[in-house]
Image: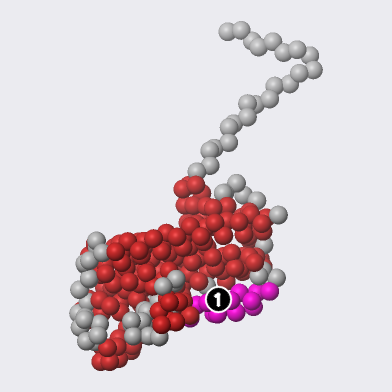
């Protein structure tokens, strides 16, 4: 065995290990697991999130059946339950920016930005963290309503939950972008969120049919992505999976997700400057 010859004044350096290749899916999983840990340790928020949809179904559902049951085709639950799931998604994901405000005030957001995790992965991971509890809550709501006469199409139910997850990523990303835009005026987040939340909800037709509404309301609802997602959920629950309503629902959900990710990533990049 021959020994290596060293010239005077030289030292040996260990060979540098190559940095592991970053993967969008891997980074997203890291962020998602980190964000879900508080939910797993304290599932109270998951249980509390079931109160609102069950209250709407228990109190508003019978009123809807008595006043507009015939206009809705007789099966009120196939019409109303998908709308309540969409409402739960809208409420849950539109407030996600408030969680980011806590990270901004504590310095957690800045520490995350200096990590090698990609900006899109950080955004998608945070948005998925909000969607995981909502999807679980939605599945529980569907199971709870089965003894009360709900008979949804199984495939349509799964597709609706997936569609709502895609929509929630977009809405959650827009909520994060709003939190970053008003980071120096935290109260402004709630002003803007509440200003847009209820008009979007009412113009989606999730609580009452819009067909008999005024012309201006029908025109405004035609540019509301949530309306197409709600109509898609109703068609999918009824088993009409090949209808144009389902297709337009996916177009609206994907478009919202793309818009939210583009706006959200730009906001995160600017916040790092």
Crowd rating for badge 1 (residues with CA inside 10 Å; few <14, some 14–19, many 20+): some
Q: Describe the element under mark 1 as helix, strand or loop.
A: helix
Colour logic: secondary structure
- The outermost residue toward the right is 9
Which residue is denoted by mark 1 in the rendering?
Answer: 193
Task: Indicate the quadrant where residue 16 lies.
Answer: top right
Residue 260 visible in rendering: yes
82 relative to 124 in the view: left or right: left
Task: Indicate the quadrant where residue 154 lies.
Answer: bottom left
Image location (x, y in percent) of residue 264:
56, 60
Residue at image coords 54%, 37% = 20
Image location (x, y in percent) of residue 156:
26, 64
Task: Indicate the quadrant where residue 192 lies.
Answer: bottom right
Residue at image coords 27%, 88% = 68
Image location (x, y in percent) of residue 250:
36, 61
Say which quadrant the C terminus sits in. bottom right
Q: In this view, does 108 lie above or below 6?
A: below
65 relative to 188 in the view: left or right: left
Residue 208 visible in rendering: no
Q: Is residue 252 on the magenta stretch?
A: no
18 relative to 168 in the view: left or right: right
Say which quadrant the N terminus sits in. top right
Image location (x, y in percent) of residue 36:
47, 62
Magenta residue span: 185-198
Question: Looking at the image, which is closer to me, 22 or 9?
Answer: 22
155 relative to 192 in the view: left or right: left
Residue at image coords 22%, 70% = 238
* Majority secondary structure in the magenta region: helix
Q: Is residue 191 on the magenta stretch?
A: yes
Question: Looking at the image, which is closer to me, 224 or 95?
Answer: 224
């Amino acid at each position: 065995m021959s020994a290596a010859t060293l010239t005077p004044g030289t030292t040996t350096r260990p060979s540098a290990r190559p940095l592991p290749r970053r993967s969008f899916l891997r980074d997203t999983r890291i962020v998602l697991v980190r964000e879900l840990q508080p939910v797993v340790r304290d599932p109270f928020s998951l249980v509390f999130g079931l109160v609102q949809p069950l209250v709407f179904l228990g109190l508003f559902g019978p009123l809807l059946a008595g006043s507009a049951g015939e206009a809705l085709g007789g099966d009120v639950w196939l019409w109303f339950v998908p709308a309540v799931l969409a409402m739960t998604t809208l409420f849950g994901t539109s407030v996600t920016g408030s969680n980011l405000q806590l990270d901004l005030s504590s310095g957690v957001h800045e520490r995350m930005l200096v990590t090698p995790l990609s900006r899109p992965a950080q955004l998608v991971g945070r948005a998925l963290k909000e969607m995981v509890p909502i999807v679980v809550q939605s599945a529980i709501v569907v199971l709870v309503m089965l003894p009360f006469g709900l008979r949804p199409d199984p495939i349509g139910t799964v597709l609706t939950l997936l569609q709502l997850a895609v929509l929630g990523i977009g809405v959650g990303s827009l909520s994060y972008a709003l939190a970053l835009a008003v980071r120096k005026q935290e109260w402004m987040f709630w002003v803007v969120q509440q200003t847009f939340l209820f008009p979007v909800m009412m113009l989606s037709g999730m609580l009452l049919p819009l067909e008999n509404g005024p012309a201006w309301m029908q025109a405004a609802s035609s540019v509301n992505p949530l309306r197409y997602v709600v109509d898609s959920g109703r068609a999918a629950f009824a088993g009409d999976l090949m209808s144009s309503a389902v297709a337009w629902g996916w177009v609206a959900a994907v478009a919202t997700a793309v818009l939210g990710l583009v706006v959200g990533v730009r906001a995160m990049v600017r916040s790092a400057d």
